[in-house]
Amino acid sequence: MMIIEREIEYEDNGKPFQGVIAYDDSNQGPAPGILISHAWGGQGEFDANKAR
């Protein structure tokens, strides 16, 4: 199992945002997902560790 992590960019209502996607590259099919939302101060290492 290897966790792949990469930054993504997306828009909501015309405003640009950045996020991070983390996934297990050994999974070959559909898999459930979890959305982790950071606190008001922005994304930090705590949030990244929870995603991993």
Image (spheres, rainbow, N blue to C red):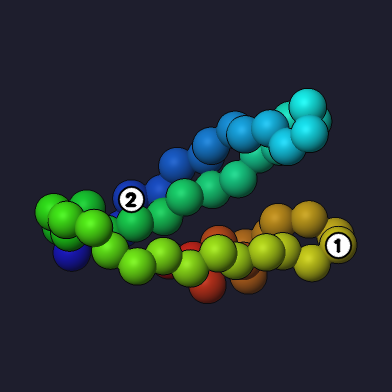
Residue type at tag 2: Ile
| Residue named by callout 2 | 4
- Res 31 quadrant in image: bottom left
Tag 2 or tag 1, which sits nearer the N-term?
A: 2
The residue furthest front is 13
Q: Going by the image, does 25 lie left or right of 10?
A: left
* Quadrant placement of the C terminus: bottom left
Q: Residue at x 62, y 34 (%)?
A: 10
**C-alpha span from label 1 to label 2:** 26 Å
Q: Residue at x 41, y 65 (%)?
A: 33
> Tag 1, which secondary structure?
loop
- Res 45 quadrant in image: bottom right
Q: Along the line of sight, which residue is nearer the eye, 13 or 43?
A: 13
Rendered view: 4 above or below 37: above
Question: Horizontal and vertical percent for residue 3?
Answer: 31, 58
Q: Along the line of sight, which residue is nearer the eye, 13 or 27?
A: 13
Residue 34 visible within the image: yes
Q: Along the line of sight, which residue is nearer the eye, 25 or 29?
A: 29
Question: Horizontal and vertical percent for residue 26?
Answer: 15, 57
| Residue named by callout 1 | 40
Residue type at tag 1: Trp
